[in-house]
């Protein structure tokens, strides 16, 4: 298992959290997505490391911004 944390900006409510969780959860191999609304921290647990570009694309699709790591 791999676990990676990211920072996402623009989230303001529970719907935002749901959108980000759903989009990242669609990435192959992702097992769990934990989103902390207050800090914008998103932790992704997956079978193998997930490409940051894939996470960025999912966050963008949800309507938010992944902060450069």
Image: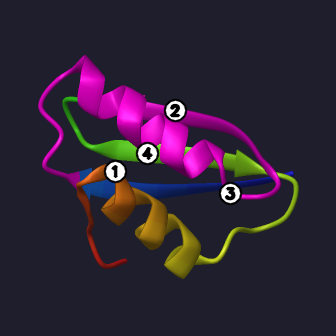
Q: Pointer 2 and pointer 4: residues touching (CB < 8 Å)?
A: yes
The image's mark for residue 43 is: none
Q: Pointer 4 and pointer 3: residues touching (CB < 8 Å)?
A: no
Single out the mark in the foreground, 2 or 3. Answer: 3
Disc 2 or 4, which lies upstream in sequence?
2
* Residue bearing the label numbered 2: 34
* Residue bearing the label numbered 1: 62
User: Dot 4: few (<14), some (14–19), or many (≥20) neighbours within 10 Å?
Assistant: many
The image's mark for residue 27 is: 3
Q: CA distance from mark 2 to mark 4?
A: 6 Å
User: Dot 3: few (<14), some (14–19), or many (≥20) neighbours within 10 Å?
Assistant: some
User: Dot 1: few (<14), some (14–19), or many (≥20) neighbours within 10 Å?
Assistant: some
What residue range appears in magenta?
9-35
* Residue bearing the label numbered 4: 42
What x and y, as percent, mark residue 48? Answer: 85, 64
Single out the mark in the foreground, 1 or 2. Answer: 1
- Is 32 in the magenta? yes
Q: Secondary structure at mark 4?
A: strand
Q: CA distance from mark 3 to mark 1?
A: 13 Å
Disc 4 or 3, which lies upstream in sequence?
3
**Does the image show residue 36?**
no
């Amino acid at each position: 298992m791999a676990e990676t944390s990211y920072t996402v900006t623009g989230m303001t409510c529970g719907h935002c959290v749901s959108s980000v969780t759903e989009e990242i959860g669609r990435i192959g191999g992702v097992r769990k997505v934990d989103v902390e609304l207050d800090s914008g921290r998103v932790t992704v647990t997956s079978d193998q490391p997930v490409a940051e570009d894939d996470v960025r694309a999912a966050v963008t699709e949800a309507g938010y911004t992944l902060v450069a790591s």
